[in-house]
Amino acid sequence: MRRLLDLRIVRRELKLAYVVGAYAIGLAIYWSLRLIGLPYGVVGLVGVGVDLAAILLGARIFRGRGEPIEPPRERWRMTARPRLSTVLGVVFVVNSAFMVLGLVLAALGVSVEPSDAAERIVGSAIGAVEYALIAALYLRSAARLRSLGAPPKEPKFTPTVRIRP
């Protein structure tokens, strides 16, 4: 585990590959557990664990431009910049709100098959709590990053060789 936490991802395309890979692994685990026949609540809780593990690991190993690569990040720090933490926090607040809306609609029996209502309620409740927790992590990171003051300027790299047409 220590070697995994020593890994650093700084390039955007590798960060995207990490996110897509983590999503694919989460889907594979979800569908495998559903095909086995485990109850929806158990599958949802396993999904929350996989999602949180992927997000927290990503927060530890991703590095932003101008951020020191070698030292480990503080435990509370989710991104390199407060604006990104704020945007991601708001996205997860909105996701949580939609899950709460789905929970309320499922509880009222709106647009849900009667046999599917209990599973939909459990899934929406688990999703709402998961997204609210992730939102809290990102918004806390944004607040603490802002309290640190202005982040260092992002370095602007200019090529040393000019190519003339």
Image: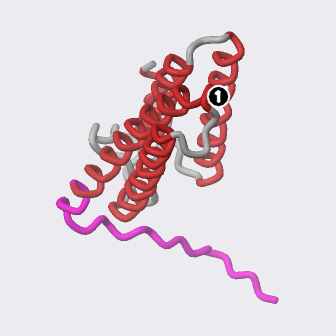
Front one among 8 and 91: 91
Q: Where residue 122 sits in the image (x, y, percent)?
A: 47, 28
Taking 24 as reference, is 140 left or right?
left
- The residue at the point 25 percent across, 68 percent down is 150
Taking 67 as reference, is 17 left or right?
right
Q: Where residue 64 sits in the image (x, y, percent)?
A: 45, 55
Q: Quadrant of the C terminus?
A: bottom right
Label 1 element class: helix
Q: Does residue 61 show up?
A: no
Q: Is residue 145 magenta?
A: yes
Taking 123 as reference, is 38 left or right?
right
Disc 1 target residue: 25
- The residue at the point 38 percent across, 54 percent down is 89
Residue farthest to the bottom, as pictured: 165
Q: Where residue 32 sits in the image (x, y, percent)?
A: 69, 17
- Up/down of 60 relative to 164, above or below: above
Q: Is residue 40 magenta?
A: no
Taking 65 as reference, is 110 left or right?
right
Residue range of the region highlighted in magenta in the rendering = 144-165
Q: Residues within 10 Å of mark 1 (few under 14, many from 20)?
A: some
Q: Where residue 12 sits in the image (x, y, percent)?
A: 59, 54
At label 1, the amino acid type is Ile
- The residue at the point 66 percent across, 30 percent down is 27
Q: Quadrant of residue 103?
A: top left
Front one among 20 and 92: 92
- The residue at the point 64 percent across, 16 percent down is 33
Q: Does residue 160 show up?
A: yes
